[in-house]
Amino acid sequence: MVTPSDAAAPGRGPSVSKLLLGLLGAGIQRSLSPALHEEEGQHHGLRVHYQLIDLDAAGVGVDVLPGLLDAARVMGFAGLNVTYPCKQAVIPLLDALSDEARAIGAVNTIVRDGDRWVGHNTDGSGWSWGFRRALPDADLSRVVLIGAGGAGSACADAVLRLGARALVVHDQVAARAAELAARLNGAFGGGRVHASTAPAAELDGASGIIHATPTGMAKFPGLPLPEASLRAGTWVSEVVYVPLETGLLKAARRAGCRTLDGGHMAVGQAVHAYGLFTGLQADAARMDAHFRRLVR
């Protein structure tokens, strides 16, 4: 017989019959994460309830994170996904970090381990999964990254692991881009990464572009770069997935660029997060097909 404590103990495989999960972030009402995790749970005999914890809807900011984590512990949450703007702000509140989260400097998945919160990052592996799937032969000679926050840090780590020879990092907060470039050069060596304050100039000669800011979301409409700076032959990767067809992707296709929509990263990170929450292997193809159905 499953006891209530089983619901707060991920990693036990088939013995877990109930699971309380959530997403912590701002402006997340259109997130597809609840549907993805709840349906995948059904295929494994799990009753998953996935709760949205929306800072915008509550009219609060990241300063409430300590209280939210305490409340989630009391209510028996087995784990939480974390999105903008909490991926870095939550780190000091956690009891431990995985090697991936520490290297990336951001957390997108928190797993309950007894009374401890352990931070993980599945964004990088999720982005890599989607990138290899959609653009397996992409040129990685010179990549420009726009956005050095939590998602951008994960993508930067991932693209370097895939073999990018040069990575240019831009962020509206110049110090954040410089810090990320320094940390990546320290981890990977070779001086392959440098920060830039003029991304449009860096796009000339870029083999690929990774966009990792909220620009393009419903609440942040617009383009993160001048459309005229896009060149045919350049690949463009988007992390925004609501909407799936962002202004950037439309402009990139008009310019003759190959594109990677944000749904690939969304599904990839969800597949790996599901494994951390449950100890079970999610069916990536099934989750991707479900995601595409939901979007349509």
Image (cartoon, rainbow, N blue to C red):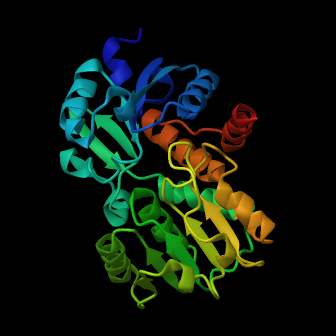
Q: How many marks?
A: 0
Residue at (40, 12) in percent of width and height: 2
Q: In this rendering, does residue 164 appear at all?
A: no
Across and down, in percent, residue 260 comes to: 69, 60
* Residue 244, above or below 172: above
Residue at (35, 78) in percent of width and height: 187
Q: Nearer the viewer, residue 47 or 137?
A: 137
Across and down, in percent, residue 264 comes to: 65, 51
Q: In this rendering, does residue 53 appear at all?
A: yes
Q: Nearer the viewer, residue 141 or 3?
A: 141
* Left or right placement of residue 158 versus residue 248 in this view: left
Across and down, in percent, residue 252 comes to: 72, 66
Work out which quarter of the rendered image holds the C terminus and state it: top right
* Residue 228, above or below 278: below
In terms of image quadrants, where is residue 135?
bottom right
Across and down, in percent, residue 240 comes to: 57, 51
* Residue 57, above or below 267: above
Q: Nearer the viewer, residue 26 or 36?
A: 26
Residue at (36, 29) in percent of width and height: 78
Work out which quarter of the rendered image holds the N terminus and state it: top left
Residue at the far top: name it: 1
Residue at (50, 81) in percent of width and height: 167
In terms of image quadrants, where is residue 230?
bottom right
